[in-house]
Amino acid sequence: MDQSCLESRCCLDEGLQCYAKDETFARCKPSCVPGPDMQDVDGKHWSCEQLGPRTPGTITEVDATKLPVPSWVRWACSSKGEDCSARGCCKDRGHQCFGESGGAGLCRVECEEGSACEARGPRTPGRPRRGSFLVIGDWGWDPHAYGSQQNHECQASIARLMDRTMGELGDVRFVVNVGDSFYPNGVKDRVDPQWEAKWRSLYSFQIRAVPWYSVYGNHDLHEASCACTEDESHCAQANYNEDDRDFFAMPGTSYYKELPDLGIEVVGLDLNHFVGGDRARSKDELKFGSTAECISIIRNRTQRGFDLFFERAEKSNATSLVVFSHYPTDYFSLAPEFLAALRDNSRHDITYFGGHRHSTDNVSTTSTRPNTNWVVGGGGGWGCDSNKQGFVVGEVNVDGSISTRAVWASPGTCCDGQQLGEPRPVR
């Protein structure tokens, strides 16, 4: 802990004041609000009694939005909607407990006009957000496909991490699923037992209580009639009823979903014509069917996906677009217009997610700066192209912008004993 100024009652640095935490400890700080201190090692309250004079000079304020949220906040502070007057702190980033003197308090970003605005404690570090989401891909492990029993534990471990992270966030609105959900050959219909064995039984009810906005991966199409028909009612993963949480939320192979209260729009794209990236493609490589007609259907479906993306990039009123397909950006060297549009932030911030490569990182892909993209194919369903197996958290800030970070499983859980091909950065 910092050196106490309890005995000296003065501070060496300019602009600082010695404030008491309790009878046993005091610290030099620029300011103090009675209650917990977000830069302290625990959630015990400070009295903020001033000890001695403030040192003359200019106070250097710290940008609290860039500070980490202490781990003790999760159990010591109040959630939105709870009375925070006793605890004096809030779990949610950028929130502060405000209330009427002697009365109840609520965690808010700012005091509403005309309401009681006495601060009951410090503001929680970080930028406040409107909500959050999780992103995962390549997770549907099968004992008869590539991978050992360890891969099954990898998928289960990541599912548990998702459940814990969702509880910590408290405001997850949806999951983005970038495909290869059922190794090795997809589901045949809505009564296929793989729905239960590989999804419902592994991911908690909490995780499946929000929509899973999903797209088809190449493995999902290997034996699926969806690959060889223009009639998408034959696509077993398609589900036009978002309230039916026994299945994914997939209103077509490519689609968009406006979320105006978050200031974002979700755009899911079927781009399976690019399964081979910039290599020559053939019927045998695609494995979607044995006829040229099937390959043509996939090619046409990919073009419709591109058309939808360009349409939404032009017409959407959202601050940010969350765009995803099964493929990482380095697979689109033959689609330079698509890559250029993913880099364009003149109308929206665009955050792109792909899978297919079995890693979760943002360095092995073709850059879309100033926008952001990730490969999120480390869901534990196949193998390890790197030791970064896990998922991505997306946080929607109050201004509609999106912050992203990865959550990884322990390498020993997922990749121990496997030969890794650590992804090389793609320029």
Image (cartoon, rainbow, N blue to C red):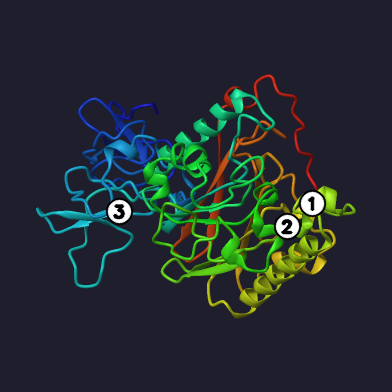
Residue lying furthest left: 102
Q: Which of marks 1 and 2 is in front?
A: 1
* Residue under label 3: 96
* Residue under label 2: 272
Q: How far apart in space, not on screen, are marks 3 and 1 (Cα)?
A: 54 Å
* Residue under label 1: 286
Q: Which of marks 2 and 3 is in front?
A: 2
User: Which quadrant holds the N terminus?
Assistant: top left
In the picture, measured across the screen, residue 210 lies left or right of residue 233, that is left
Query: Which residue type carries mark 3?
Result: Gln
Residue at 67 percent of width and 68 percent of height: 230
Q: What is the x, y in percent for residue 229?
A: 68, 64
In the picture, measured across the screen, residue 8 lies left or right of residue 116, that is right
Q: Can residue 394 be seen in this view?
A: yes
Residue lying furthest right: 280
Q: Do the residues labelled 1 and 2 touch (CB within 8 Å)?
A: yes
Residue at 36 percent of width and 31 percent of height: 41
Q: What is the x, y in percent for residue 394?
A: 52, 52
Q: Can residue 322 be seen in this view?
A: no
